[in-house]
Image (cartoon, rainbow, N blue to C red):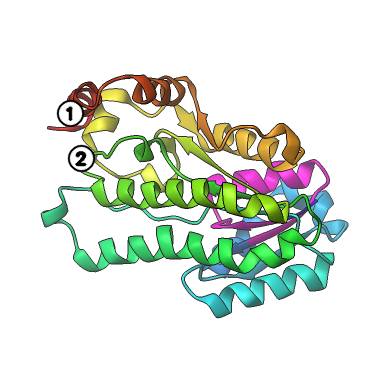
Amino acid sequence: MNILITGASRGIGLATAKKLAAKGHNVGLFATNTTTLKQAITDKAFKKSLKQKRVITGQLDVTQPDSWDNAITQMIDNFGSIDALVNNAGVLVTGALPTTNLDEQLALIDVNCKGVLIGCHKLAPYLADNKNGKIINVSSASAIYGQPEVANYAASKFFVRGLTEGLNIEYEKLGIKVIDVMPLWVKSDMTADIEVTSIDRLGINLDVNDVAKTLCKLTTSPNRKLRSTHYSVGLPAKLFQTLAQVAPDSLIRWVNTKVGAK
């Protein structure tokens, strides 16, 4: 398979790229910071795939349509086609909303919402060519119910969830499967120095390889076997998603208050 991964210079994106490359797939790692990206692929996990010219890197600002065009061209020039997009790039801003920097919150919306939307729009014609194309959006368990101290981040992941659900239906006629993954907090560079009440109370029980394992399995599975739209990562997220489907809103709100509110 030929797979384009955004936000691939570190964290979940990089871990996913390593696993897919190790399985023999052609992988395009794209990120805004090409210096970090070039350093990342010096990892021994890419040694064989680099020698076989199965890995490429490139600059991609997911908020800019022209940047997507360049990334797509690079994939086509090197691999001939694109089979899957892992829409992973994302940012996080924490804190009570009025105390945070508004420009940073708006930039979050640009990356987490606009970036995912552009990717889904731009890749559709290319993924439809093989009639078994796939888009996997990286959402969050925060998209199950809004979270205090990360309200805007949660809202952006609700956007990803809604977009995924709509396109899962809309793109079916194109032969493209659109799904998302919904992990709870993940131990990564993104969460290394943040202070959030829900982390203090629940801890962080996933690492990037846990999510990458799920992404790798979903990316390489035949579309006909992917019967769900949302895939929770980790038992707590799965339990919370199930609870949200059957419990009254008042109970879900109470649980989230106990978990995330000071």
Earlier residue among tags 1 and 2: 2
Q: Quadrant of residue 249?
A: top left
Along the line of sight, the residue nearer the viewer: 239 or 49: 239
Question: Within the magenta stretch, is there residue 153?
Answer: no
Along the line of sight, the residue nearer the viewer: 6 or 222: 222
Residue 137 in the image: x percent, y percent? 54, 49
Which residue occupies 74% across, 67% down?
Answer: 75
Q: Residues within 10 Å of mark 1 (few under 14, many from 20)?
A: some
Amino acid type at circle 2 is Pro
Residue 225 in the image: x percent, y percent? 72, 32
Element assignment for label 2? loop
Residue identified by numbered label 2: 148
| Residue 29 located left or right of residue 203 | right
Which numbered circle lies on residue 257? Answer: 1
Which residue occupies 81% across, 73% down?
Answer: 77
Residue range in magenta is: 4-29
Q: Residues within 10 Å of mark 2 (few under 14, many from 20)?
A: many
Res. 134 in view = no
Which residue occupies 23% across, 28% down?
Answer: 256
Q: Are marks 1 and 2 in contact (CB under 8 Å)?
A: yes
Vertical side of 249 occupied by 135: above or below: below
